[in-house]
Image (tube, grey):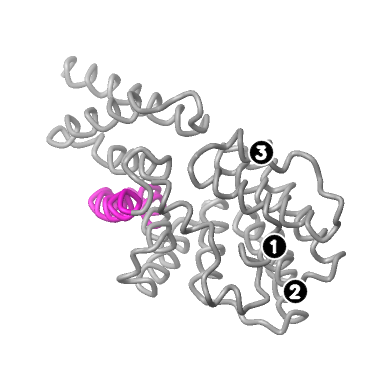
Amino acid sequence: TLAASATDALPTAEQCASSLPSPASAPLPVVKADLRRLLGLLDEADELIAVPGDDPAQRGYQSLVRAHTAADRGDLLLARRLLEAAAFEAQANHQPELAAAAALQRLAMACATSERALWTGYVDAQLHLADKALAQPEYQAALAQSLACEGKTAEAVKLRQQVVRALRGDESAAGAAAALELARALLAQGELVEVATAAHNAATTYTQLYGARHPLTQTARLTVAEAQLSSPISSGEAEKTVAEVLAGVGDRSPDALRARPLLLQGQLAAAHRQRDEA
């Protein structure tokens, strides 16, 4: 887990040669904070960048990682505000690549057509200033998340499927994230068999990358369990998964991760009562 998360936090050769935001260009405390976030140590990540740096050019990076940490906690309101701060701080310091990266993630959290149009335009403007192009799967993933937030499930699922197809065979964190997001979108649509397949693929990749107890691995496993809840045949497996995740959740785990297995446990209990009454 430590090795895989550390590898994710280190720059690749392409990032070192690029002007795009990456660990190659971010300040060292920000890289350390993001590594701790990847390990699920959210309190430690926040402590490392709680105080704004003296260099204004570093503040956009700090706000961006703080936004990621807030999102990992499930605090989406704070995450939105911090992403906006990161985008505007980067723009003020003539860092259009960083501004575009923050704005793209803010676009993903837009839950209305007008809001989505605003942040799409902002991303395009910053990319134009940077003379950069955006990878299509990255844009599609952000757009799909926004559509899902607005309740446009069918459109979100279609885009998620396109992203997964584009990343087919990708066993990186990006490939696992695409599979997990597809599973979530399919869950909202009620496609339970497809949910279990996509979430299982995500859980397998996250386990290989980060280990079985990492929050992302546990989230993917819980998504499989949620798809199994309505099936009398699979509910026993779901119950086992929920119990294992609850047993492994510690005080340092994000609140959202601690709450979800408890919610599923309640749904399992309700399902048991209904079967007993029948």
Q: Which mark is residue 46?
A: 3
Q: Is residue 37 above or below residue 198?
A: above
**Residue 89 left/right relative to 69:** right
Q: Residue at 31% of width from left, 38% of height from top?
A: 226
Q: Which residues are magenta?
A: 182-208
Quarter occupied by the C terminus = top left
Residue 16 horizontal side relative to residue 155, left or right: right
Question: Which element type, helix, strand or loop, lies under badge 3?
Answer: helix
Depth check, mark 2 against mark 3: the one in front is 3
Q: Give the residue at x 23% y 51%.
A: 193
SS for tag 1? helix
Q: Which callout, 1 or 3, points to the residue nearer the camera?
A: 3
- Residue for point 55% across, 43% down: 36
Considering depth in this image, is 247 or 259 the residue closer to the camera? Answer: 247
- Residue 265: give x, y in percent of width and height: 33, 24
Farthest left residue in view: 233
**Residue 253 % position (x, y):** 48, 31
Residue type at mark 1 is Ala
Contact (Cβ within 8 Å) of mark 2 with mark 3: no
Q: Main secondary structure of the magenta part?
A: helix
Q: Quadrant of residue 95?
A: bottom right
The mark found on residue 103 in the picture is 1
Q: How many numbered discs sit on the rendered protein?
A: 3
Instruction: Please give the residue where the numbered disc 2 appears in the rendered image.
Output: 126
